[in-house]
Structure formats: structure tokens, C-alpha cells
Image (cartoon, grey):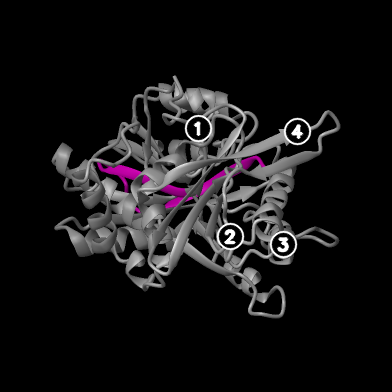
Amino acid sequence: MKTRAKGIKEGKAVCGSMQNGNGPIGIVDVSPNGNHAFSAIVSLMLGIKPIETKVKKFSDGEVDIDIDGSVRGTDVFLFQSYVAPVGERKYEFENTVSAARSGGGARRITAVWPYCFGMRGERQTRPRQSVPIEVWARSAYAMGVEQIVTVGLHTDVIKTIFRAVGERGGIKVEDLPFEPLAANYIMQSAIARDLTDIVVASPDSGGTKRAEKVLELIAQNSSLRPDLAIGHKYRSPDEQTTPLRLVGDVAGKSVFIYDDIAGTLGTIEGATRMVEDAGAKDITLLFIHPVLGKGYEESLERLAANPKIREIVFGNSIPLKSAALNCPKVREIPLEPFVAEAIRRLNANESMSDLHKYGTIVEIYERMREEGVSPRRFDIRQIG
């Protein structure tokens, strides 16, 4: 059963403010009803008292948004969950920026998108094709958004696109890396199961850099020396994928397949078959973003029924859909401590570079757990 954070009411967004660093922080969440738990936990970690924001929808689809509390001079962090339909989310986001900026007199507005809207469309691959990330960037800039906090961008070029819009240097993007969390999860799994022969695998060549980073972090922070395996695939026009071959030795080893976006799960099914056919001992699947597009349910059911697959792990950048919530092999890695610390540092004008270091990230999770405010709704291996 899906858990909602205590104190969140139907038909309300979540907002909060407190004095911290250079000024008051405001947390505003315009995600759909039932999807406010992420921002509520971040608020709890920051010691912020929630302030309600009313989101009214008229019969013709128009929205009327009122922030029910002062945000004048406030450093506003505006949360928006990636929940369909995306067009509605964009319209609600823009109206909330208007309420905070023009109507409320906010000092600064930072968008908090744990999953960055439009990031799968960062370039043209055919003539007369739109570039969704450019649309989001220009819209956010025009509305007055100055910064974005996100996790695990699909490509680095996305940051460049946001910086290129407008005349004032565009929008600064703080991209929090998921690889340290993935590396820690793998290391803790290896310790718990007394593993020595492990492989970090990418289902396609596009994810090689991500897999290599995870492998590097494991080698730097443990006695493990994992191998690397890469799958090569062809993507047809209907988004179905056909793996071609596996590069790397996985025979008799525990394989951790790592990818950023879990869509229809077709790519992962193919990668899993390749790894199985190559003689893998067992398989764990790790993803940053559980997008889980149309038709994912059947693929997830088959993956969960596969005895070779031990766990299917997602970052909680997007609220899990029903089939994933009820899947016994699904686990989540909480991102709230990471995002809360990023907000605190941005508000205090502190350095963000440490948030790309493995040791700092582990310390954040350990501190949150010691203070008794670590996310309690996750069935995950302990970070640290």
C-alpha cells in the first residue's frame, strides 16, 4: 500500500519556510494529490513547518493557485513530481512560479525536479523534431526560475542547454550524482552476501560512462575489484530494442546491471537474457529513475518471476506506480537526504562541490539516520 506523509491533505500543495543561512527557505510542492511525500520528508529534514498552497482546478482545465502564506523575500524551492500528464504539470508549475514571483514577491525561485522534465529529448535525431528540454528551459527562464536541483541527468549537455537560454547566463543546474548511492548499495550487498566476484554492467554503450563511474567508486572505497560488462543494442522506431552482444566476462559472477531510466523495461529484459546466457550467477537491477512507461507491467512481472534476479532497485525520483509498489523484489533508494542537504547549501551559499564526493554523501545519510529523520518508508539496505 502506498504511504503518504503525515499531515498532507488532499487538494493541497505543500509549502514551508524557515530562517536558514542567508534568508528564509520556502518549500512549495505542486505535484498531484498523493505525491507530496518527497517534499514533506525534505521539509522535515530541514526543520520546516509546512504552509499549505491551494491548487484549484476549474471545469475547463484552468488552474488557480494561491500560496497560503507569505513568501516575500523568501528563497523558494518549488517541487514538481514527474507524473502524467506532463503538460498539466508544466502548466501548474508555471502558474505556481507566477504566484510566488509576481504575486508573492519571492527573492529567488529554484525548481526541484528529482527527475528533470524533458531530459530524454536533449537533441534532434531527425529533421523537424522538437527538443523538449529546450522548451522546458526557455519556459522556466521566462517565468523567472534561476536554479534547478535535479538528480542523475541523462546527459551533461542538458546543463549547457539551461545555461544557454536568456541573457543573464540562463539557469544554473545542480545535478546531484546517483552513482555514489548505487556504488554504496552494491558494496553493502557484496558485504552482506560475502561476494568477491562481481560485475557492474550497462545494458547499452550509452550508459558506459555511468557504469564506469560506479565501478571506480567501488574500487576506491572497498577492497572489491569489479569487472565491467557492456551490452550493445539497436533501437527500432517503435522504441523496441534488440540487444546484439555482450562485451565482458560475467560467467559465475554476481552482476549488477545499472541504467539511468527504467522505461518500458524492454532494454533491461534483453540485457538480462544476454547476461543469463553468458552464465551469470545472479542479477541485481539498479535504476535512477522509475519512469515506467506504458506496458512496463508485463516486463516487470517477467523480471520479478525470474529466479536469477534478486532485486530491482530504483531511486525514488518519481513516485512508484502500482505494479512496482506491489512487486516483492522492488526496493527504493531514498533521495530526500541528498536533496535536503543541497537545498540547505544553496540557501546558505555554501560550496556544492562536496556533494559530488562519495564520503560526503555517505556522511549525509549517516547523519540523517542518527538524528532520527531518515526516510522510514523505504525497504533498503542501509547507506554507509
Three-letter residue code for mark 1? Leu
Three-letter residue code for mark 2? Arg
Between label 1 and label 4, give the one nearer the viewer.
Answer: 4
Sequence-wise, the earlier of marks 1 and 4 is 4
Three-letter residue code for mark 3? Met
* Magenta span contains residue 152: no
Picture coordinates of residue 283 (x, y %)?
34, 37
Three-letter residue code for mark 4? Lys
Callout 1 environment at 10 Å: few (<14), some (14 to 19), or many (20+)? many
Callout 2 environment at 10 Å: few (<14), some (14 to 19), or many (20+)? some
Which labelled disc corresponds to residue 143?
3
Q: Which residue is mark 2?
A: 72
Q: Residue at x 26, y 63 (%)?
A: 360
Residue 113's place in the image compared with 212, above or below, is above
Picture coordinates of residue 245 (x, y %)?
49, 49
Q: Going by the image, does 10 lie left or right of 185? A: right
